[in-house]
Structure formats: C-alpha cells, structure tokens
Image (cartoon, grey):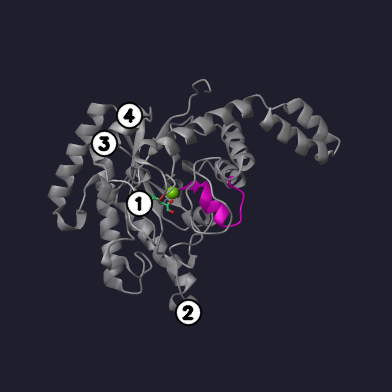
C-alpha cells in the first residue's frame, strides 16, 4: 500500500449503489444513510458529496423552513463525525418538472422550478458549510435536434447561472460536463464548453469545472488533457475519478480498471499542477459491478483509492531525466516503452 499523501478523498451516497440498472432491479439490499456515513469513515474518506435530496430526502414535499431545519441537523451529524460536505448538487433530472430539462426546458414554468430548486440548493450548501455547487446538467440537451436551439439554450443556461451567482455572493458553481447519457447530445459536453460559458456570466471567477474521467472518455477526449486544461485556468475545483471502457453507457468503473496508463497520466497531471493544494478533494464517482456480493460492496472505493495512491508513487518515481533525453532525441518509440516498463515495474 502506498504511503499516505496530502490528498483527501470523498464519495457520495450514490456510490454505495445496489446494482440496479435500466434492465434489472437491485442485486444488494439498500443501506441507510447512517450505514453509508459509517462506511465512508471506516474507509478513511474525509468528505461526502451530496445531491440536494441526499441531504434532505423528499425535498419537494417539504417547506423551505423544514428543508433548512433538516440541513442543519445533517450538518450537526457530519460535524459530530468529523466529515465535511464537499459540495451540494441540485438533482434536476428526477423530478416530473424536469422531464424536458431544467434550465433549458421549453416550458417557462419548469425553468422557474429548476432555478428555484437550485437557489434552495445554495441555501443547503451554506448550511452544510460548503461554497461548492456541482452542476451536472443531465437533461440540458436534446433527444431530437430540432426540439431546442443551442444558442437559446446557452442564453437560458447563462440566466440560470446568473440567478445562482446573485443568490449567494460567495458560492462557486462547478460545472460537470458530460457529452451524452441520458441525452443524445448535452449542451455542455466538455471542459472547454464549461469554461467558455463561465465567461458569459455575471461573475466568471466563480464559475469553474469538475472533470469526470468517464465523461471525458465518452467525449473521445483524454481526461488528463482535460484536467491540465482546466488547471491552466485555475478552474478545476473538483474531480470525479473513475474509468470507462470505450464509447458505451457510462460505466463508472473503479479508477484504473479499464486503462491503467490513462489513469497514470491523470495522476501525473494532478501531481504536476498541484491539484488538492487549495483544499480540493479527490472524489471517486464509481459503482460496484452489478454482480458484487454485499460483503465486497465497498471494494470499488477502497480499490480506487489504493490504485490512485499507487499511481501517485509511480508519478513521483517516474524517470523524468531519462524521459526528457528521449523526448529531446525525438525517440518516442523508447519513450513509449519507458512508460510501459515503469508501470509494469
Ligand atoms: C453522472 C454523473 C453524476 C454526478 C452527480 C453529481 O453521470 O457523474 O454521478 O457526478 O450526480 O452531480
Ligand atoms: Mg460524476
């Protein structure tokens, strides 16, 4: 096992999932929130990510005062356990109101619902002691090209971001791009799109990004380049490490499971650019394989962190001098082998 590093780790309650997929039901019994919090602690993770309705279940049935009361109770609970809330994300893809998207819905009433719910999410985040709001824009896109316009949707997204920025002057909005699933095409498919739309808002400094390895791979991009690009802007505020075997449904495999070299390059960039030094967490957005037995139901988290820490060691012991000499000699053939040998060694 690797020595400890300065990285701090985080997962969400949804990462203790029970095996349900679009074609079949759960394969493991559901566990309570307390069980998940306890497991997270035992694993040595230091923070939890929350959807607004993870923090306050059945949120739409409760009054604003009740929502805040329950958020305060959760805060006390987390403080008591020494666990931080990393972020809160409005889950805008479950409600009947957001069937056609939230911020970009063609129905103005539903767009208002999405903005109101996001404002409430900012209030919950403040109570939980985090300034980070994650926006995975799940249904902001189209199944059918002709049903919406990208230009108009961009305007609507900017209006929504502006409404959130105005609601809480300290909050930071962290866009998590994904090119598809559940939509055919999503409006913010890459980090470039996320950072570009930030520039159109009333406070670009408070709009940044979260990279998920699988989402970059689904866009046909290299996650390490996406990370490096966002870090060049000082805008990588969170990270969902996982893995993905090619262009198919979002797999959320354990980190390094499909392509160790791609995982290694992500860790190398994080090390080189100093990700984590401003308090950013390394989150694993991973799920157990559907066949996983209950007694192995935490392995995907434990193993993702183990692989991450092993790769930190590999990044730190990378033979940079030898690699630089090969680069200077344009001997990429041997550079390739040097990387392979280093990972095998
Ligand atoms: C799905 C996303 C999802 C988000 C989470 C936080 O593809 O990765 O898990 O990260 O809902 O908003
Ligand atoms: Mg994610």
* Residue at the image position 26 percent from the left and 36 percent from the top: 35
**Above/below status of 123 relative to 310:** below
Q: Pointer 2: what residue? A: 146
Q: Marks 2 and 4: which is nearer the front?
A: 4
Residue 334 visible in this rendered orientation of the protein: yes
**Residue 66 image point, x, y percent:** 13, 48
Residue to which mark 3 is pinned: 35
**Residue placed furthest toward the top:** 3
**Residue named by callout 1:** 165
- Alpha-carbon distance for marks 2 and 3? 46 Å
Q: Nearer the viewer, mark 1 or mark 2?
A: 2
Check contact, mark 4 vs mark 1: CB within 8 A.
no
Image quadrant where residue 113 sits:
bottom left
Which x, y percent locates residue 170?
Answer: 34, 42
For mark 4, give the secondary structure. helix
214 and 134: which is toward the camera: 214
> Magenta region: which residues?
209-223
Give how far apart the Cα atoms at labels 3 and 1 are: 35 Å
Q: Vertically, is 324 above or below 22?
A: above
- The residue that label 4 is drawn on is 41
Q: Residues within 10 Å of mark 2 (few under 14, many from 20)?
A: few
């Amino acid at each position: 096992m690797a020595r400890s590093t300065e990285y701090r780790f985080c997962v969400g309650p949804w990462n203790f999932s029970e095996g349900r997929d679009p074609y079949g039901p759960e394969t493991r019994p559901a566990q309570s929130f307390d069980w998940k919090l306890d497991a997270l602690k035992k694993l040595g993770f230091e923070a939890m990510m929350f959807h607004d309705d993870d923090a306050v279940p059945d949120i739409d049935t409760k009054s604003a005062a009740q929502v805040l009361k329950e958020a305060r109770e959760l805060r006390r609970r987390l403080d008591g356990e020494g666990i931080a809330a990393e972020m809160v994300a409005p889950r805008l893809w479950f409600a009947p109101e957001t069937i056609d998207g939230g911020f970009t819905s063609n129905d103005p009433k539903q767009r208002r619902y999405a903005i109101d719910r996001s404002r409430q999410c900012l209030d919950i985040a403040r109570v939980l002691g985090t300034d980070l709001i994650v926006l995975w824009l799940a249904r902001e896109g189209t199944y059918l090209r002709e049903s919406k316009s990208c230009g108009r949707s961009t305007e609507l997204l900017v209006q929504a971001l502006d409404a959130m920025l105005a609601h809480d002057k300290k909050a930071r909005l962290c866009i998590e791009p994904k090119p598809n699933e559940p939509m055919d095409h999503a409006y913010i498919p890459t980090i470039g799109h996320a950072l570009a739309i930030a520039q159109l808002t009333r406070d670009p400094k408070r709009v940044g990004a979260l990279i998920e390895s699988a989402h970059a791979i689904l866009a046909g991009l290299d996650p390490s380049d996406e990370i490096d690009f966002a870090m060049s802007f000082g805008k990588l505020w969170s990270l969902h490490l996982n893995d993905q075997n090619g262009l198919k449904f979002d797999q959320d495999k354990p980190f390094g499971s499909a392509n160790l070299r791609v995982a290694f390059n992500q860790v190398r960039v994080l090390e080189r650019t100093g990700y984590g030094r401003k308090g950013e967490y390394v989150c694993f957005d991973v799920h157990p394989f559907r066949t996983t037995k209950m007694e192995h139901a935490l392995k995907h988290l434990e193993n993702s962190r183990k692989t991450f820490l092993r790769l930190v060691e590999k990044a730190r012991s990378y033979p940079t001098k030898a690699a630089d000499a090969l680069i200077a000699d344009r001997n990429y053939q041997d550079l390739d082998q040097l990387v392979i040998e280093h990972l095998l060694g």
